Image (cartoon, rainbow, N blue to C red):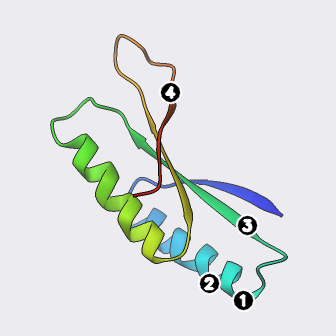
């Protein structure tokens, strides 16, 4: 089963990512998780934060997509794959 997770980098979402990563390691055929991290570019340093979250998720064995958008272009698109 393919499942997408929106991960902010906060404690709750990182705990969810860790649990999902553990489920995936337990039975790779049953679960395939992809983490989506948003670089909203609304705050200085958001790109660095998104990169740090992506690296942590990659270390957990998750596939990561960083999406980005701006106030002038709020339609988010994939910026990078993983860290």
Q: Position of residue 34 (x, y in %)?
A: 62, 58
Q: Crowdedness of circle 2 by 10 Å Cα count: few (<14), some, many (20+)?
A: some
Query: Which quarter of the image is occupied by the N terminus?
Result: bottom right
Q: Earlier in the sequence, mark 3 or mark 4?
A: 3
Residue contact between numbered discs 1 and 2, judged by CB atoms under 8 Å: yes
Instruction: Name, please, the residue furthest toward the bottom.
Output: 26
Instruction: Say which element carries label 1.
Output: helix
Residue contact between numbered discs 3 and 4, judged by CB atoms under 8 Å: no
For label 1, the residue is 26
For label 4, the residue is 76
Instruction: Say which element carries label 4.
Output: loop
Q: Crowdedness of circle 4 by 10 Å Cα count: few (<14), some, many (20+)?
A: some
Is any part of residue 10 visible from this angle? no
Q: Earlier in the sequence, mark 2 or mark 4?
A: 2
For label 3, the residue is 32
For label 2, the residue is 22
28 w.r.t. 43: above or below: below
Residue at 84% x, 77% y: name it: 29
């Amino acid at each position: 089963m393919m499942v997408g997770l929106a991960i902010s980098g906060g404690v709750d979402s990182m705990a969810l990512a860790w649990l999902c990563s553990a489920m995936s390691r337990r039975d790779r055929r049953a679960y395939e998780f992809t983490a989506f991290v948003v670089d909203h570019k609304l705050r200085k340093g958001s790109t660095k934060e998104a990169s740090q979250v992506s690296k942590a998720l990659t270390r957990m064995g998750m596939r990561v997509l960083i999406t980005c958008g701006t106030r002038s272009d709020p339609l988010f698109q994939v910026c990078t794959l993983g860290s």
